[in-house]
Image (tube, grey):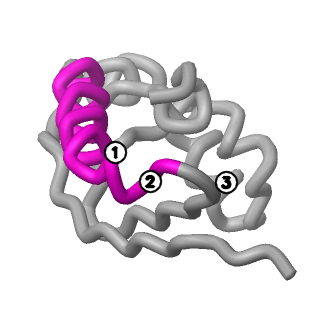
Amino acid sequence: DKSYRLAFVGCHLPAHEGKLEKRNGALRQILDAFQSFLSGEAVVFTFGDLNYRINTTYVDALKDADAWATVVRLANERSIPRLAALDELTRQPQV
């Protein structure tokens, strides 16, 4: 039998467009604080307001209504794989 340590972490990462590096840095700090706990077999669940964005900006959406309409349509269609392809968090290298 194999056992795992589980960690459940509530987060509120920096918000707003253009703050991707700050979000990544804050998440790194949080995970670093758990490093001694995470040695060995561990699974970490992060919850809360991570503030990662769908990779289209508000300004771009205002300029290109089709881009925003596409995001809304994909959300309404529950097209998770296509939305995930635009998601900041899933596009990041391992944090």
**Location of residue 89 with respect to 17 vertically, above or below:** below
In depth, the one of 94 and 82 nearer the eye is 94
- Inspect the image, locate mark 1, and give the three-letter code of the amino acid beneath it: Gln
Q: Are marks 1 and 3 in contact (CB under 8 Å)?
A: no
Q: Are marks 1 and 2 in contact (CB under 8 Å)?
A: yes
Magenta span includes 31: yes
Tally the marks. 3
Residue, x 29% and y 52% (percent of image)?
A: 34
Distance of label 3 from label 2 (alpha carbons): 40 Å
Element class at badge 3: helix
- Inspect the image, locate mark 2, and give the three-letter code of the amino acid beneath it: Leu
Q: Is residue 14 left or right of residue 25?
A: left
In depth, the one of 64 and 81 nearer the eye is 81
Q: What residue did someone put label 1 on?
A: 35
Residue, x 58% and y 44% (percent of image)?
A: 71
**Location of residue 18 with respect to 65 vertically, above or below:** above
In the rendered structure, which segment of residues is drawn in magenta?
19-39
Distance of label 1 from label 2 (alpha carbons): 5 Å
Distance of label 1 from label 3 (alpha carbons): 40 Å
- Inspect the image, locate mark 3, and give the three-letter code of the amino acid beneath it: Arg
Picture quadrant of residue 60? top left
Q: What residue did someone put label 2 on?
A: 38
- Marks 3, 2: nearer the viewer: 2
Q: What residue did someone put label 3 on?
A: 73
